[in-house]
């Protein structure tokens, strides 16, 4: 049975988390509209020494690829990262490639066309633009650029030839998608300055990541010369350079951590630079450290809880106390599991990977809370060196 842990603002012990009704309400501006956020973003202090979450090299990277196991929060983290990087007057492009309109959903806007659009204002005056890359549109853009196909290209599309080509050769699809992202990273404006300070890519999940990024391998048999081959070579140079950083989002449980460590090793073997591991949805710890192990083992003193509540003026029925005890045990077990997963991230790779931590937002992610996640990243050191 779920029983609220705190009934009144005065019921909290000294180290109890801030009550929800006390949470700061921050405002976010997107597309001229203003939104309020209402969650706390307290990140639990981590045991042990933590590697620098955002080493200097990352502030010089221009292509930030966000991947991770399915459902761990890639789109949410990519959006928050774009906001954090744009902070203080930068211009960042957030790109998605899976045709799922995930960016439009997190920013609560209409579906994105194949066109770069301003989607949010970052704290301190920066801006985030967004682009949903569509492989067919990218191929058409290609035909126009290299073969001036124009109408003929559009006819091909109507005939379904492009869909046919990209379905037949998934490597072709990937090289079109990554090629477009690369074009955005390297594009300069008429004054010779880069169009973007950085590009953040909401990438496919880890299982497909290396084959997605390492397009030249996939293209080796497909195109040995010509513009597509040139495109693949350009992508290859970018993703193996210090301009690229691949961030891996994980939750603190066994499977996603294993997948993260495997992906980190795979990227390393492919010579693709790793960024930070983003530990997402870390829960707030309600219990003091010294009580976690005992509580996880079922040792919770119900009498002490009842007396504590009584002294705060709260009378609960015995069944409610039982519910509280069960919830406490469940919470302690979860915290122990998370701590063990964290330890794996700390000890298995040598040296340990840079790591950012984001809190579990109560009530899910809305626009205001996206800004809070960005703020939490900024507080952990996420930033970009100015480029333009
Ligand atoms: N820190 C967080 N706190 C609470 N909820 C979160 C947090 N991060 C993400 N979520 C929620 O988790 C769900 C999955 O997040 P998201 O869509 O970003 O994951 P994903 O990895 O992009 O998923 P997919 O593999 O389907 O693309 C969403 O409902 C999102 O709102
Ligand atoms: Mg997603």
Image (tube, rainbow, N blue to C red):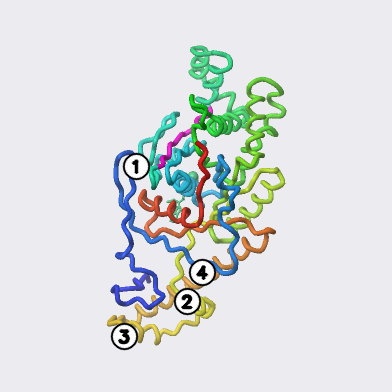
Question: What's drawn in magenta, residue-wise?
Answer: 126-135
Mark sitting earlier along the chain (4/3): 3
Residue 128: image x %, image y %?
A: 43, 40
Give the Cα separation between the discs numbered 1 and 2. Answer: 39 Å
Mark 1 vs mark 2: which is more N-terminal?
A: 1
Callouts 2 and 4 close, C-beta under 8 Å: no
Rendered view: 301 above or below 156: below
Magenta span has 128? yes
Q: Which mark is residue 288?
A: 2
SS at mark 1 in the image:
strand
Residue holding disc 3: 311
Give 125 or 209, whichever is nearer the viewer.
Answer: 125
Q: CA distance from mark 4 to mark 3?
A: 27 Å
Q: In the figure, 35 relative to 128: above or below? A: below
Say how many tags the image has: 4
Residue at the spot x=57%, y=24% of the render?
Answer: 164
Question: Viewer-proximal residue, 161 or 309?
Answer: 309
- The residue where tag 4 is placed is 335
Q: Main secondary structure of the magenta part?
A: strand
Q: Nearer the viewer, residue 196 or 99?
A: 196
């Amino acid at each position: 049975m779920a029983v609220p842990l705190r009934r009144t603002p005065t019921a909290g012990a000294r180290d109890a988390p801030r009550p929800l009704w006390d949470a700061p309400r921050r405002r976010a501006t997107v597309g001229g509209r203003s939104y309020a956020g209402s969650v706390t973003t307290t990140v639990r202090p981590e045991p042990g020494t933590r590697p620098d979450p955002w080493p200097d090299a990352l502030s010089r990277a221009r292509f930030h690829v966000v991947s991770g196991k399915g459902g761990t929060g890639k789109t949410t983290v990519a959006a928050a990262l774009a906001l954090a990087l744009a902070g203080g007057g930068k211009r960042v492009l957030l790109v998605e490639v899976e045709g799922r309109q995930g960016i439009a959903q997190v920013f609560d806007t209409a579906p994105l066309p194949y066109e770069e659009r301003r989607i949010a204002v970052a704290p301190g005056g920066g801006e985030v633009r967004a682009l949903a890359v569509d492989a067919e549109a990218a191929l058409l853009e290609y035909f126009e650029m290299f073969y001036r196909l124009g109408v003929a290209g559009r006819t091909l599309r109507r005939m379904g030839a492009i869909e046919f080509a990209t379905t037949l050769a998934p490597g072709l699809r990937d090289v079109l998608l990554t090629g477009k992202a690369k074009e955005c990273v390297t594009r300069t404006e008429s004054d010779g300055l880069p169009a973007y300070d950085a590009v953040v890519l909401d990438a496919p999940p880890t299982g497909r990541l290396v084959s997605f990024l390492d397009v030249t391998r996939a293209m080796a048999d497909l195109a040995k010369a010509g513009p597509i081959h040139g495109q693949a070579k350009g992508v290859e140079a970018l993703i193996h350079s210090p301009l690229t950083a691949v961030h891996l989002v994980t939750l603190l449980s066994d499977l996603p951590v294993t997948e993260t460590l495997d992906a980190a090793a795979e990227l390393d073997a492919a010579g693709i630079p790793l960024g930070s591991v983003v530990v997402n949805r870390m829960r707030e710890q309600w219990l003091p450290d010294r009580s976690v192990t005992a509580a996880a083992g079922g040792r919770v003193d119900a009498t002490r809880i009842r007396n504590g509540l009584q002294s705060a003026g709260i009378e609960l029925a015995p069944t409610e106390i039982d519910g509280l005890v069960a919830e406490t045990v469940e919470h302690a077990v979860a915290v122990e599991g998370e701590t063990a997963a964290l330890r794996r991230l700390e000890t298995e790779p040598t040296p340990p990977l840079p790591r950012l931590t984001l809190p579990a937002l109560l009530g899910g992610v809305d626009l205001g809370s996206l800004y809070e996640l960005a703020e939490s990243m900024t507080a952990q050191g996420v930033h970009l060196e100015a480029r333009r």
